[in-house]
């Protein structure tokens, strides 16, 4: 018999400042087991998640730019992202390009347009009610998301996904002009890791 015990935790990290300057910013988040690398505009932070789970078992989808109102976390301060993203990559797939060519199963919700001022790659503009939904991949110990974004709003949800079996969620957002990553792991009790600056 293998007992994991009570696992409580939330991991959040915040980085950057003045990200609502209408300039492009690059974000990369990579998870290898419990080790996380968060890179914003080439400045990397390393951290380790709480809990004892090495696999990130994403639920049915991962969303970029926001999420359906019915699935939003309890915090009412999270607003969907309003601005442009480009070069959205998820575990090696160029989601922006695949969504534009309709070669993937993502569902575009709301008024998404594949243009932005000064496009040099294929950007996606999100209004306050739109988001891009992509199927998740269960039982993965690697989670990698990267994209460029620019906005004039100081707050907004960039990426969100629930874990399978109601074991928590991962959330990346802009809060007061800074990027925050929240990883919630729940089993018997709640784990939350907050990373911010």
Image: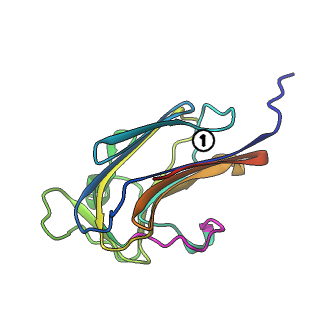
Query: Quick check: 135 left or right of 82?
Result: right
Q: Which residue is mark 1?
A: 57
Q: Residue furthest top?
A: 1
Q: Residue at x 65, y 38 (%)?
A: 50
Question: Predominant secondary structure in magenta?
Answer: loop
Query: Quick check: 98 left or right of 67?
Result: left
* Segment tinted magenta in the rendering: 71-81
The quarter of the image holding the N terminus is: top right
Local packing at callout 1 (Cα closer than 10 Å; few below 14, some 14-19, many 20+) is many
| Residue 64 within the segment the image draws in magenta | no
Residue 118 in the image, given as x and y percentages of width and height = 12, 66
The answer to whether residue 153 is seen in the rendering is yes
Query: Quick check: 45 left or right of 193?
Result: left
Q: Residue at x 52, y 42 (%)?
A: 137
| Residue 75 within the segment the image draws in magenta | yes
Foreground of the two, 177 or 150: 177
Query: Quick check: 41 left or right of 142?
Result: left
The answer to whether residue 88 is seen in the rendering is no
Q: Which image quadrant for residue 17?
A: bottom left
Foreground of the two, 189 or 179: 179
Residue 42 in the image, given as x and y percentages of width and height = 28, 42
What color scheme is it?
rainbow
Foreground of the two, 119 or 15: 15
């Amino acid at each position: 018999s293998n007992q994991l015990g009570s696992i409580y935790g939330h991991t959040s990290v915040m980085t950057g400042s003045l990200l609502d300057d209408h300039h492009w910013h690059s974000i990369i988040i990579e998870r290898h087991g419990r080790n996380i690398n968060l890179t914003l505009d080439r400045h990397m932070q390393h951290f380790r998640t709480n809990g004892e789970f090495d696999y990130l078992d994403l639920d049915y989808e991962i969303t970029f730019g926001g999420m359906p109102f019915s699935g939003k976390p309890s915090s009412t301060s999270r607003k969907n992202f309003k601005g442009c993203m480009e070069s959205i990559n998820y575990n090696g797939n160029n989601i922006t390009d695949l969504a534009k060519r309709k070669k993937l199963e993502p569902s575009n919700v709301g008024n998404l347009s594949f243009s932005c001022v000064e496009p040099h790659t294929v950007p996606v503009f999100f209004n306050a009610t739109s988001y891009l939904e992509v199927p998740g991949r269960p039982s993965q110990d690697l989670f990698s998301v990267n994209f460029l974004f620019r906005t004039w709003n100081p707050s907004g949800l960039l990426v969100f996904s629930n874990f399978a079996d109601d074991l928590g969620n991962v959330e990346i957002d802009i809060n007061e002009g800074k990027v925050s990553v929240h990883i919630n792991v729940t089993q018997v009790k709640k784990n939350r890791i907050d990373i911010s600056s």
